[in-house]
């Protein structure tokens, strides 16, 4: 199959057409870390061999081949000398053909001499062009705005990059000009399901819990194209709220039973690590369910009496602080406020709009090292629901680390997709 190849034309003073592809002449490095193009060596060609990460096959999931498929490849070539690391050229190939060992791209225009090679896969052409004129040594220093829509195409293929910048020496002997590069997905994958023996008795003893769903919250939209050696992302030292985006109503998905024959719904998240690991900085799984109290307090004469609750939807909770806090449920705000005013050590009424309650599952990489890493599969298994969730999707302690004893209990294993399996108990 013949590949559709596009050479990016680089702006420069003199354009010289040599050997069937466009070359540009320039010189030097700019102060901002970008580079002009230098005509170095004689025209030649190279062959690129790409290894791609395999997919972990989810039970009953037949669409994971997309997670290791390449629909486009962008090849960036840099001068490879010790003194300079400047950008030389960018070639784009669409619809490459896979072979038994991965993907092989032939006849990539380059020039003789020491070179360095970096590859993007499944990036839009617009995003790939942002890398032009940048030096190779900026790949893990310059932050790029990469939304999930930039990294997971409509066809469901996933953006990948080289795991490192490859070095090579090219000669006029085209057959000897071969470079091998290993690709890594830029994002993580998340699934959520119930354990076989999930325990909901702590909540179902108070009422009925329905429509347990999940989504991803707090997406980090700033990434390095080449993963930092210490796995630090652009927001490691300083949290910038505008670099993050919140959950969307359209993304809520059912939490499947462990033995369900239905597909496990997958969602994806960008890499997100932080020095302080505060709740507001972390990417998390947000869970939501609708709760209906079994009973509601009503005032009968001078006494408060529990009566069977036939109302669904919005309800109110007042917490009475004793040795063990107790929750009182109400189906209208007037009754809740009256009870709170009349009762010692009572909280203000808490409104659960439409009956929704929320829990957090902060993603981590073992030993509660909070954060999300690229090319990791986080398989989350809900072990139990220990308490009624919060009334709001917002985190409860934004300036603090997640509370290990009360928020999450996890067993972590690492397998394909560098898989991390989390077994969790849910509390608000």
Image (spheres, rainbow, N blue to C red):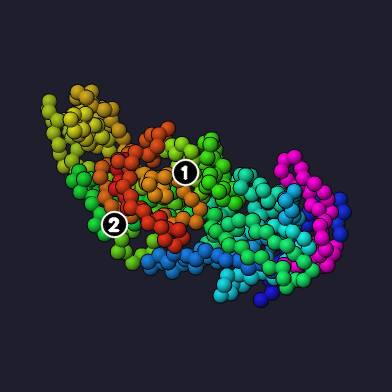
Quickly name the residue at label 1.
Answer: 218
Q: Which mark is residue 307?
A: none
How many angstroms separate mark 1 from mark 2 (CA)? 25 Å
Q: How many marks?
A: 2
Q: Is residue 300 above or below residue 295?
A: above
Q: Is residue 245 left or right of residue 61?
A: right
Residue 310, given in percent of the width and then of the height, sits at 21, 44
Q: Is residue 234 left or right of residue 112?
A: left
Bounds of the magenta span? 17-46
SS label for mark 1: loop
Q: What residue appears at the point 40 percent right and 37 percent down from the top-left corner?
A: 401
Q: Report the front residue among 140 and 65.
A: 140
Characterize the magenta stretch by its predominant secondary structure: loop
Residue 43, given in percent of the width and then of the height, sits at 81, 65
Query: Badge 2: how crowded within 10 Å, few (<14), some, or many (20+)?
Result: some
Quickly name the residue at label 2.
Answer: 195
């Amino acid at each position: 199959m013949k590949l559709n190849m596009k050479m990016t034309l680089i702006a420069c003073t003199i354009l010289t057409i040599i050997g069937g592809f466009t070359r540009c002449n320039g010189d030097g490095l700019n102060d901002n870390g970008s580079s002009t193009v230098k005509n170095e060596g004689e025209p030649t060609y190279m062959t690129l061999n790409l290894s791609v990460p395999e997919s972990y096959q989810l039970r009953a999931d037949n669409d994971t081949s997309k997670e290791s498929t390449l629909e486009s490849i962008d090849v960036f070539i840099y001068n490879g000398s010790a003194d300079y690391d400047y950008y030389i050229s960018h070639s784009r190939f669409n619809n490459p053909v896979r072979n038994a060992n991965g993907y092989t791209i032939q006849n990539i225009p380059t020039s003789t001499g020491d070179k360095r090679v970096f590859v993007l896969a499944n990036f839009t052409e617009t995003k790939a062009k942002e890398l032009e004129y940048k030096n190779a040594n900026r790949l893990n220093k310059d932050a790029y705005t990469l939304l999930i829509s930039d990294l997971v195409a409509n066809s469901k293929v996933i953006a990948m990059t080289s795991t490192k910048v490859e070095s090579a020496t090219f000669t006029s002997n085209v057959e000897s000009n071969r470079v091998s590069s290993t690709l890594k997905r830029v994002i993580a994958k998340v699934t959520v399901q119930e354990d076989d023996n999930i325990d909901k008795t702590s909540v179902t003893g108070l009422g009925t819990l329905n429509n347990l769903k999940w989504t991803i919250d707090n997406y980090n939209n700033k990434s390095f194209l080449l993963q930092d050696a210490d796995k630090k992302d652009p927001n490691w030292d300083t949290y910038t709220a505008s670099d993050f985006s919140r959950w969307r109503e359209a993304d809520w998905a059912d939490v499947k039973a462990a033995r369900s024959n239905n597909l496990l719904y997958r969602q994806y998240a960008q890499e997100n690590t932080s020095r302080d690991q505060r709740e507001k900085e972390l990417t998390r799984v947000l869970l939501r369910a609708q709760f209906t109290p079994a009973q509601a307090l009503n005032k009968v004469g001078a006494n408060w009496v529990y009566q069977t609750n036939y109302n669904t939807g919005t309800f109110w909770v007042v917490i009475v602080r004793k040795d063990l806090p107790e929750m009182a449920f109400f189906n209208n705000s007037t009754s809740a406020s009256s009870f709170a005013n009349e009762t010692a050590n009572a909280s203000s009424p808490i409104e659960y709009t439409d009956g929704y309650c929320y829990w957090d599952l902060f993603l981590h990489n073992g030993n509660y090292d909070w954060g999300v890493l690229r090319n990791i599969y986080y398989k989350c298994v809900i072990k139990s629901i220990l308490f009624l969730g919060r009334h709001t999707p917002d985190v409860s302690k934004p300036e603090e680390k997640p509370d290990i004893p009360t928020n999450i209990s996890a067993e972590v294993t690492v397998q394909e997709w560098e898989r991390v399996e989390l077994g969790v108990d849910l509390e608000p």
